[in-house]
Image: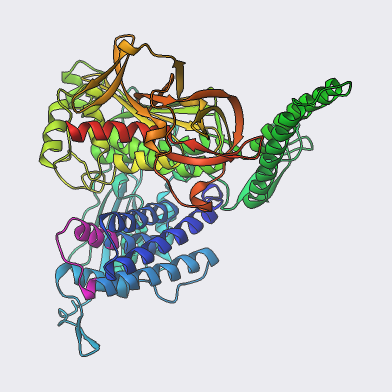
Amino acid sequence: MSNDLKRFHATFFEESREGLEVMEAGLLDLEGGRGSADTINAVFRAAHSIKGGSATFGFTKVAELTHVLETLLDELRAGKRPLTTDAMDALLASVDVLRGLLKAAEQGVPPADDGAGIVAQLNGVLTGRATIAVGGGAKPAAAAPKPKAPDQFVIAFAPKPSMFMSGNDPLRIIRELAELGGMKVDCDLSALPAFGDLDPTQSYLKWTLTLPGSASEAVIRDAFSWVEDECDLSINGDRGAAPAPPAAAEPAPAAAPAPVAVALALAAEAPAAPAAGAIPIAAAGGGAPAGGGANEDASIRVQASKVDMLINLVGELVITQAMLKQVGTGIEGPLAERLLAGLETLERNTRDLQEAVISVRMLPVDAVFKRFPRLVRDLAGRLGKQVNLKTFGESTELDKGLIEKISDPMVHLVRNAIDHGLETTEDRIKAGKDPVGTITLAASHQGGNIIIEVSDDGKGLNRERILAKAREKGIPIADNPTDADVWNLIFAPGFSTADAVTDLSGRGVGMDVVRRNIQSLGGETVLESFTGKGTKVTIKLPLTLAILDGMTVGVGNEVFVLPLGYVIESMKPAGENVRTVNAEGRVLKVRGEYLPMVHLGNHFGMGGADKPEITVIVEGDGQKLAIEVDALIGQQQVVVKSLETNYRRIEGISGATILGDGRVALILDVPGLVRGRVNTSSKAA
């Protein structure tokens, strides 16, 4: 494995351990009757993530075990089988074995248990031949007679010409098999061109390999697991004559499109993030080119917890500075002017310090984008589609914590775009489109937010099919739904229009998980689609979760903070523009558009004016809302404190902050308020 991949091991192991903890806790909740559909979904997602990472890094034993585990979990969550004692025993034992396999892989030592036993146990549950609890012991079902080992294995291996372009080396596989001992190698040179016509990026050779019957067939197949889609392969374990090597595929014409041929390095598939718990920090400037030298930028690795502590201290400094400013404005006399000048300097320096500390946690979004060329290439090949990946704004920076958490949602979006969005080559040609589909990833800054777009130029969403599936699943649908209303239906939990379940789609893990993950980061997701032209998903995220610019509003005796990125405008609405609509409640007419209204005091049960004079128009998840407040106080930067960590989660509230006068102000969850108001209207309809 390349060093580029090895540097991401620490992140994988840390995330996998967290996933195993989620799995174990969820399974125990299910066994104790405390679980729900969300619990089994969380267990499934954890296993799915571990499987994907282990396959990427070549930990085949982990990948094999989690693949079988995922199959069983999927059947359980789909209601295809009950959660019996033998199934629970196998699932919990799988968690224990996975811990051992991951620990051994992390330490670079052979595992005490290679997982073969638990894989057999899981397969026994799936096929109905599981062990049955009898009097406190376990009695295995009768096993089928073990087949006699073959005298030899004969392998016909013909790499496709482009195998090198994926970063795979046929000779590495052959050397790996040679370690099993007693291997005979015959090489077919018939496709080798003249020396002057050789292309060093193409593979021309094919081999017939003969191994003794004592070799493990599972080990043999493991050696080829990474290249099954990039070669013609047959493994014959009979005593008969050796099969003829399959004909090597013809090299693709030079003019043929190579959509993701630029993904030459295996690192393109790796989750691009620094080692878990640490952040690389530039210690000196110089701008020297990569490759070393006295002027090359130096860097040190600092624990993320230390950077978080710095950010927290700067946040406290911001609060203190706000307090001093508020006190200073009430002072009069000859020293007042000098005091205020000093406070202005303190405010400027505090903001500069805050931006400098936060920049330490900033990483280019390319850290996420770099994993997709290989992913797009592999998925396109498996689906028989031609796909071109374009990326823009790779240098746009985002908080490290968000970088790590945005990766999985983006994987879902890219997979959906290739699987569901893009047509087959034949269908694109019939539609008069370029036979090569395009997936575009773009990132940019917009105010205090980062905008990430995942788009395709495929067929677009099928409105009628989505509506039919929603009715079938009993999902509430508004009367005369707009396109935006219909597109939002695909974010419902478990929603899928796939006709068949595959390892790519149809299990209902997708868009609801995407939106939920984005919402947990204080962001929002908006989907647009146009028939025959494609689909675009826009993700809006704060640059950092530590500090935000907000509008402070008064409701009764309380102060709330509206994140400025969601605010469109504020106004004093005329009485004739406020109306009551059946099933919709009160709405406000703004330039011909009717917006649902929320009286903030009534919503949180704290009173306030019966008819507030001020209305703030906000937009979240692509939908607008009119929020009624008693007063606009001002605009200021606030330090975000987690309300859930320090108290508990409250619907409609994303966090809290401390104001300059020492009071606590709650930060509104604008997308949550919008969803709650829209959902209430939909149910009433």
Residue appearing at x 19%, y 79% in the figure: 146
**Does 479 appear above or below 131?**
above
Question: Which quadrant does the C terminus fall into?
Answer: top left
Q: Is residue 646 magenta?
A: no
Residue appearing at x 39%, y 71% in the figure: 97
Q: Quadrant of residue 63?
A: bottom left
**Does 161 appear above or below 478?**
below
Comparing 545 with 128, the one in front is 545
Residue extending furthest toward the bottom: 135
User: Would residue 665 be found to the left or right of residue 196 on screen?
Assistant: right
Callout count: 0
Residue appearing at x 18%, y 55% in the figure: 78
Is the magenta region chiefly helix, strand or loop?
helix
Residue 115 rendering spot, x and y as whole percentages: 35, 71
Residue 367 visible, this angle: yes
**Does 73 appear above or below 412?**
below
Q: Quadrant of residue 22?
A: bottom left
Residue appearing at x 42%, y 58% in the figure: 19
Residue extending furthest toward the top: 591
Q: Is residue 82 magenta?
A: yes
Residue 560 rendering spot, x and y as whole percentages: 51, 33
User: Would residue 382 be found to the left or right of residue 631 on screen?
Assistant: left
Give the extent of the magenta segment: 69-87
Residue 250 rendering spot, x and y as whole percentages: 28, 35
